[in-house]
Every structure is written in C-alpha cells, then in structure tokens.
Amino acid sequence: MLTVRTTPRVDRAIVVAVILTVVAVAWAYLFVLTAAVGEMGSSLAMPMTADWTLRDWVFMAAMWSVMMIGMMLPSASPMIVSYRSFARTGSLKGSTPVFAAGYLVAWVGLAVVAAAGQWALHNVALVSAMGVATTPVAGAFLVGAGAFQFTKLKRACLGKCRTPMGFLMTQWRDGRRGALVMGVRHGVYCVTCCWALMALLFVLGVMNLAWVAVLAAIVLMEKVAPRPDVLTRVLGAGLVTWGSWLIVGGFL
C-alpha cells in the first residue's frame, strides 16, 4: 500500500479542516432542528407532550449529543492537533480519529445524562418544553454553576485541558486502544471542568442557539485565554449574583 506523507503544516491544516467540517455539520443540524420547533407534525420538532416517553428521551439525547459535539469540538482542537503532531514523531503510534472519537464519547455520556435530567424536570413541570427552567430552579442552577467556578476541581481539570503537551507526555499510550483511552480520559477532564456551564442551558434555553454559541465561546476562552483564572472567577461571581437575584425575586 502506498503511504502518502504530508508535511506537519499540511497535516495540521487537514486535521483542522476535518474538525471544522464536523462542527459545521453539527451546527447545521441544530439550525434545522430549531427551525422545525413548533411546526406541527414535524418529525424533528422537540417533544411537547405533558410527559415524555422513552422515544422522546432518545430524540433529546441525540440532540444533546450533536449539540455537545458542536460546542466542545472547537475547544478540543488544540489537543487534537497536538496529538496528531505527537503521533507523527519517532516510534510513537496513534490514531487521531480514534482519539477524537474517545473525547466525544465522554461528551455523549454527558448528553445522555442531561437528556435524562431534562426528562425528569420536564415531567414534574420544572422546565418548559423548550428546556427553560422555572425561576427558582434557574436561580439554583446559576448559583451552583457560579460556585463551581471557584472550586479546586474546576481549576485542576481546566489546567489539564489547557496543557496539551503536558497531557500527552504523561498520558501517552500507543495504538488505537491507547488513543481511545487517552481520548476518553481527556474528555472526562473536560466534562468535569465544564459540566456546570453546560447545565446553564436549562437556564438560557436548551434550543436557544445564540446562548449555545455564547457558552461555546466561554469554554473556548477558558482554555486559550492567557489568564483563565480571572475569566473563571469573574464569570463565577456574575453567575452567583444573577442566580441569587432570581431566587430572591422568585420569593418576593
């Protein structure tokens, strides 16, 4: 079999192009889904029944999965590109597609849990059919997410996400199986770092794509900004303040 070797620069361009294509497809699906919401009889419309069925949950889990891919894959691109560069050097053997797939497995896992949570909250009327929580619940989500921004766990996992070379040098495993394990492990760090921000979708609206884009941008900035500690704390303080205001207002 003829193997075509590319330069590192071309290799990186190919990886980035593939990532952008996958992200574009995910966002295109979300735009189509948003347009379908409210259309009677559309098979793409979100479940609006009083109580969800298992079929509704499967549909929403798929929607959450696509949304997580569209939101999180851009912020993982530095790690994926670094993995590809690492796999080209010396005697190391790896698989970039498998590594990326492992990363996304972790986020699909969160998507399944988020859809189950939405199912439970929807059936007790704590979130609307559009995935927006009632005021006291929304306030609790905001305060919880804001408080998590100040925890040691947040800082530790964010540090892992921000240092691709450090992760690869300490966690490297050869082969496809190793790539899968590494991808899942990095995904778990990322999920642990960002799960509270994803929970804010219940406050902002699960299908509000403008807010989905804002959260995706925040996650990306936390990973690439020169002073992420400042951004993280300012965001945390803002969320706690906003949530407290909603909670107090809900009881007045």
Image (cartoon, rainbow, N blue to C red):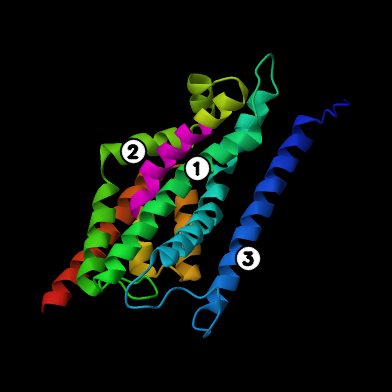
Q: Position of residue 92 (x, y in %)?
A: 65, 17
Chief secondary structure of the magenta portion: helix
Label 3 to label 2: alpha-carbon separation: 33 Å
Above or below — where is 140 with respect to 153? below
**Circle 3 Cα neighbour tier, 10 Å, few/some/many (<14 / 14–19 / ≥20):** few
The residue labelled by disc 1 is 105
Q: Which residues are magenta?
A: 182-196
Q: Amino acid at mark 1?
A: Val
Q: Amino acid at mark 2?
A: Arg
Q: Position of residue 169 (x, y in %)?
A: 52, 20
| Mark in front: 3 vs 2 | 3
Looking at the image, residue 1 sits to the left or right of residue 247; the answer is right
Looking at the image, residue 124 sits to the left or right of residue 173; the answer is left
Residue 42 among those drawn in magenta? no
Q: Amino acid at mark 3?
A: Ala
Give the SS element for disc 3.
helix
Counting labels gives 3
Mark 3 or mark 2: name the one nearer the start of the chain: 3
Label 1 to label 2: alpha-carbon separation: 23 Å
The residue labelled by disc 3 is 28
The residue labelled by disc 2 is 155
Q: Quadrant of the C terminus?
A: bottom left
Residue at position x 66%, y 31% in the image: 84
Above or below — where is 164 with respect to 32? above
